[in-house]
Structure formats: C-alpha cells, structure tokens
Amino acid sequence: MKTSLYRVVDLMTCAIANMLSDHETVFHGVSSHLPMVAIQLAKQKHAPNLVHLNIPGGVNPASISEECYSSASGNLLKGAEAYFPLEQIFDLSMRGKLDVAFLSGVQFDIHGNVNASVIGSYKKPKVRLPGGAGSAVLIPTAKKAIIWRTKHDRRTFVEQVDFITTRGNVWKIVTPLCIFIFKNGKLHLESIHPTSSLEEVKENTGFELLYDDIKFTTPPTEEDLKLLKKIDPKDFRSLEFK
C-alpha cells in the first residue's frame, strides 16, 4: 500500500497488533491509547481469544467507545467479562502468567535499559520524571515487554541512559521510524518503517545500529485501516502525537 494512504500512527498500531497472538494475556496501563487500540485490532483480526487487561480492571471490555478518552477510564469496565484489579496483575506477572505488558519510558540505550526517572543527575536532575511505577515490576517479570514511543531522536535513544529505572526483558520497541528487538543483550534493528529510511534511523539514534538484514515493517492493509476506523472512530491512537 502507498505510504500516502496511511499515517505513521496507523502503521505503528498495526505493527503492534501483529505482535500479539491468540490466547495471550495482555496488559496496558495509563496513557496507552495506541496499544489499547492495537489490542482491539488484534482481537478482531487474528486473536479473538486474546485476554485484554487494563488499569481499571475490566477484563476484555466490550469495546473502546467514544467515551474512552482515557486508557485508564472506568468506561473500560463497561461490558467487561470480569473484574481483575491492578494488584492482581502485578501478582500475575510475577508468577510468570502475564504474556505481554505495554510500557514506555523517556530514555533507552542499546543494552535495553529504560529510564523513566530523571534527566541528568539523580540528585540534581534537569527534569524529574514520574519514575518506574508499574514498569519496574512488569518489564522484568512479564514474558514479553513491548515498549512504544512516539518520539525517535538522539535524546530518547542514547548511548547510556541517565538513570536505570529498569533493565532487561524488553522484547521490542516500536517508534515512528522503526522497530527494535532485544537479543543477545543488545537492541537490534528489526525493521524500518516504509515511511522512513536507514539513514533517518541512524541520524536519530544515539547508539550504533546493529542489524543483519535491512527489512521493512509490513504496512497496514485496507482491511486494517477500515477496522481502525471502526474500532477507534475518535482517533484516540493519535493523542500522543499531538
């Protein structure tokens, strides 16, 4: 499909949906509209038995309605199949039963370290960030931690993070330019989006790019785009890009 027929956010949402498999148990937290939409897309396309968990505790909410202005909204309890509170999600993950956790951060380095705590010195930071919250527990314990980030620049992907909020077990990182995969102790370039190029990824990454072959991310199909409009008519998935 021509790149002019879809947006980067659509590509990222579909790429994330394609990472999810049927029967997996998947969790997203606050400020997570993009993965929330991706979960619903996966359920409608190829993973009808996927289990959707979220902050309010609604298991498999009926839909992401026009009222779901927040990915932590109580509206996600409407029509849900069951109630599963947040503290049990942490317990589920620590018992090795959470297949996928969607999380984010502010800085990432080639070793898969995630910083969500401070920019600059910890004692005298330039910026004090929210901190680890759930990511400090879920990234190390979930079977697969998927990171998404709507910015890809040298301040985000750095040689060494200013502070290690959590480390290890990052599976993939999805950005507006590419997808990284963590293997052999380092981030590797898995695919470049058709809307970007190897040169652009290099220019905006603060560490050396490691890759075997140059691959491109699979673009959305017409069916994908139609489903996205049906699932997310208010375009909540674009909120982080605004």
Image (spheres, rainbow, N blue to C red):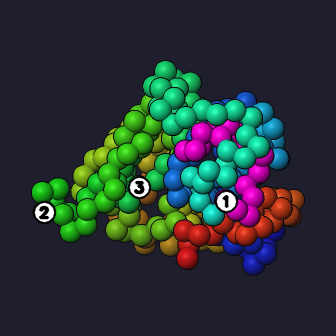
Q: Quadrant of residue 239?
A: bottom right
Q: Which of marks 1 and 3 is nearer the N terminus?
A: 1
Which element type, helix, strand or loop, lies under badge 3?
A: loop
Q: Which of marks 2 and 1 is nearer the N terminus?
A: 1
Q: How far apart are marks 2 and 1 (CA)?
A: 38 Å
Q: Is residue 185 left or right of residue 36?
A: left
The segment highlighted magenta reads: 53-68
List the residue tagged with mark 2: 124
Q: Where is residue 101 in the image (x, y as percent from the top left)?
A: 54, 41
Q: Distance between the residues labelled 2 and 3?
A: 20 Å
Within-10-Å neighbours for mark 3: few <14, some 14–19, many 20+: many
List the residue tagged with mark 3: 105
Look at the image and tell me in which quarter the N terminus lies.
Answer: bottom right
Q: Position of residue 54 (x, y in %)?
A: 59, 43
List the residue tagged with mark 1: 68
Which element type, helix, strand or loop, lies under badge 1?
A: loop
Q: In this view, does 113 lie to the left or right of 223?
A: left
Q: Is residue 58 on the magenta stretch? A: yes
Amino acid type for the residue under numbered disc 1:
Cys
Who's the residue at 78% across and 39% down the image?
47
Q: Distance between the residues labelled 1 and 3?
A: 23 Å
Amino acid type for the residue under numbered disc 2:
Lys
Q: Is residue 165 on the magenta stretch? A: no
Look at the image and tell me in which quarter the C terminus lies.
Answer: bottom right
Q: Visible in this render: residue 20?
A: no
Who's the residue at 69% across and 55% down the image?
37
Q: Is 113 drawn above or below residue 137 in the view shown?
A: below
Q: Visible in this render: residue 122?
A: yes
